[in-house]
Each structure stands twice: as C-alpha cells, then as structure tokens.
Image (tube, helix red, strand yellow):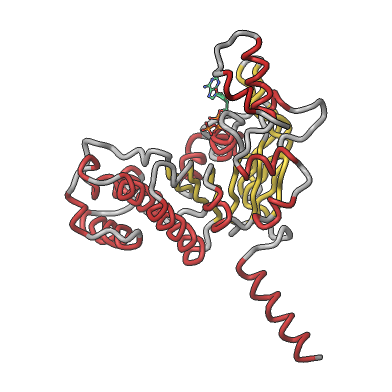
C-alpha cells in the first residue's frame, strides 16, 4: 500500500515537472483584454493566464481572432481595452527600448515561414543575431550550423536560397531562425499548414523537443487537431465575437486536449470533428435568400 502511494507520488511529481500546473507564476497574462477595429469587436474581455513552460494551442474558426490574440501578446497590436502582462509587466506601457529588449525573448514562426528571399538560408537564420548586434562572424557561423542541425537540416543548406528548398524545409528554417536567440516564449502561427502528414509530424516533434530541451513557453495557432493532441498541455478555443450570445465568454474551451471531444459544448465538438453543423443551416438560409450557394448542400442537410 505504502509502495503504491510512493509510486503515485513519484508519478504525480514527474507529471507536474513536465506539465506545469496552473499554480505556476504566469508568464503571459491577459486581463479583460479587448481588441476592436473601429466598431468591429474582434476580441472581447479575454482573461487568460499562461504559466511558464506551458504549451498552449489556440484553435477556432477562421477570422475568430487567433492571430490578433498572438499579436497583442507580443506587442504588435495594442489592445483597445484591458491589459497584456508579460512576466508581470504591462507590455503596452513599455518604452521603445524596453519593448525591443522584450521582443528578443520572443521567437515567431510564421505561417509561410516568412524568409527573406534575397538572403541565403544562413543569413536568414543569422538575421536576429545581426539585427540585435549579438554575435560576430565566427560565432554567427557556429550558431547557424547548430540551429540548422537542431531542426534536422545539413550545414550545406546555409548557402542556398529559400526558393531552392521545399515548403517543409522552409518551415524548419523559420523555426531555426525563431530559436536563434534562445527565446522564452515561442509563437507559432499555423506551423503545419500546407505540409504533408509526415512533415507535419516532423514539425510537431520539433515543437515538442523545443519545449522539452529548452523549457520554453509556447503559443501555437493551428487548425490541425493532430498537432493539438500531440503537443498541447492545454487547448483554448476562441469563438467569433459576432456569433456569441450576450454575456457569453469568447473562450469556449480551456482545458486539456484529451477532454475536448467530451465537452458539453456542441460548438467545440463540431469544430474538432470538422462538422459544419449550423453553418449548413446558414448556407440553406443564404440559398433561399438567393446568395447563390449550391442547393445540393442545403438539400443534403439533415439535423
Ligand atoms: N488591420 C485590420 N483592420 C481591420 N480588421 C482586421 C485587421 N486585421 C485583422 N482584422 C480582422 O480581425 C479578424 C480576426 O483576424 P485574425 O487574423 O486574428 O483571425 P484568425 O482567427 O487568425 O483567422 P485565420 O484562422 O483565418 O488565420 C478578422 O475578421 C480580420 O478581418
């Protein structure tokens, strides 16, 4: 019995060392954060607390505000209400120099890798080091080789141009560049979009490795539920503000990936299963309104 309890305690300790609990100090905190463009509300009264070391996957339908959320977290977008705190500091109150220093702690992996076409791969990966004046010629070369090796690319690609690489290789170069300053917080915007299932899994493994080896905190936007299930400690689902009922929270799921299929919220279940649900009703309505949607869709719909 005591042995069982000891084993349970050891299991729990090892689980907690891998998956930080909500009790850890938040690295990123959104307090009542709102973002509007003119009168259009994109994000409304969002409250989130992300502990250091956690990997959070953000899902939700196109246009619900996932990218805007990421951009406000890193100070690229200023919220129209509420606060964004990083390590306890309100980032939108920082001066230019403090903001530049803070941005060094962030690593971005953009959807299309966003490499500079006119530069070699080596120059692309080295770019943040040069931009922040953080290394000289020899050490730059060494760091670039190390980072390329970490994402499974040979040193020989350093002399190539982005156009000479496949989409999967370009994504890995984007990841190598994002890691070059040893970031505390990694932000990925649809890191596996457009990749075949094998290459998607390579990227998933690299994200997992980054988290395990470097202990970074990660925010990942994805439409790929395999990525969510594989890498997330926590999944957050956003719902478009315009579709909410009065007083509803825009975060309609916040929990472990394992629980997402069992949630009571039909909107969440339909999303993760890829079911169109009430959207088909809307198509039917717009068809009868004469918006030219193929009638077969509406005719096939059964509730
Ligand atoms: N500069 C801007 N001015 C006005 N509206 C904007 C601006 N940038 C984004 N939006 C609007 O904000 C909303 C949220 O955009 P966002 O890119 O965050 O969506 P998303 O959930 O990331 O979508 P996707 O999954 O398609 O990438 C969209 O309706 C978009 O049209």
Quadrant in which the C terminus appears: top right
140 sits to left or right of 132: left
Residue plotted at (71% across, 32% down): 82
Which corner quadrant of the figure contains ligand 1? top right
Rendered image quadrant of residue 221: top right
Residue 275 appearing in the image: yes
Rendered image quadrant of residue 77: top right
Q: Position of residue 155 (x, y in %)?
A: 21, 59
Residue 35 appearing in the image: no
138 sits to left or right of 111: left
Rendered image quadrant of residue 60: top right
Q: Position of residue 301 (x, y in %)?
A: 66, 28
Taking 293 as reference, is 101 above or below it? below
Residue plotted at (64% across, 43% down): 85
Quick one: which residue is furthest to the top in this view? 290
Exactly how many numbered labels are in the figure? 0
Depth check, front residue: 277 or 224: 277
Q: Position of residue 119 (x, y in %)?
A: 22, 40
Taking 291 as reference, is 227 above or below it? below
Depth check, front residue: 200 or 172: 200
Quadrant in which the N terminus appears: bottom right
Depth check, front residue: 297 or 27: 297
Residue plotted at (33% across, 59% down): 147
Residue plotted at (49% across, 34% down): 96
Q: Position of residue 117 (x, y in %)?
A: 24, 36
Depth check, front residue: 118 or 203: 203
196 sits to left or right of 92: left
Taking 249 as reference, is 146 above or below it? below
């Amino acid at each position: 019995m005591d042995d069982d309890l000891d084993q349970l305690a050891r299991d729990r300790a090892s689980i907690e060392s891998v998956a930080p609990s909500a009790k850890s100090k938040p690295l990123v905190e959104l307090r009542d954060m709102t973002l509007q463009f003119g009168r259009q509300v994109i994000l409304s009264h969002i409250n989130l607390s992300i502990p250091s070391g956690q990997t959070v996957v953000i899902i939700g339908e196109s246009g619900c505000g996932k990218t805007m959320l990421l951009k406000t977290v890193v100070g690229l977008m200023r919220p129209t209400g509420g606060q964004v705190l990083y390590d306890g500091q309100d980032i939108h109150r920082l001066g230019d120099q403090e903001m530049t220093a803070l941005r060094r702690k962030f690593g971005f992996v953009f959807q299309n890798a966003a490499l500079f076409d006119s530069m070699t791969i080596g120059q692309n990966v080295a770019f943040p080091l040069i931009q922040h004046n953080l290394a000289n010629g020899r050490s730059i070369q060494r760091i670039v080789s190390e980072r390329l090796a970490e994402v499974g690319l040979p040193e020989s690609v350093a002399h190539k141009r982005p156009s000479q690489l496949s989409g999967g290789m370009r994504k890995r170069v984007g990841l190598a560049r994002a890691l070059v300053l040893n970031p505390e917080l990694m932000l990925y915007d649809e890191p596996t979009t457009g990749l075949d299932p094998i290459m998607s899994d390579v990227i998933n493994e690299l994200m997992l490795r980054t988290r395990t080896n470097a202990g970074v905190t990660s925010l990942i936007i994805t439409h790929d539920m395999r990525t969510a299930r594989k890498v997330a400690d926590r999944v957050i689902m956003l719902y478009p503000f315009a579709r909410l009922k009065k007083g509803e929270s825009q975060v309609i799921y916040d929990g472990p990936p394992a629980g997402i299929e069992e949630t009571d919220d039909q909107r969440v279940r339909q999303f993760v299963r890829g079911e169109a649900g009430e959207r088909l009703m809307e198509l039917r309505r717009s068809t009868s309104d004469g918006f030219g949607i193929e009638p077969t869709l509406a005719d096939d719909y059964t509730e």
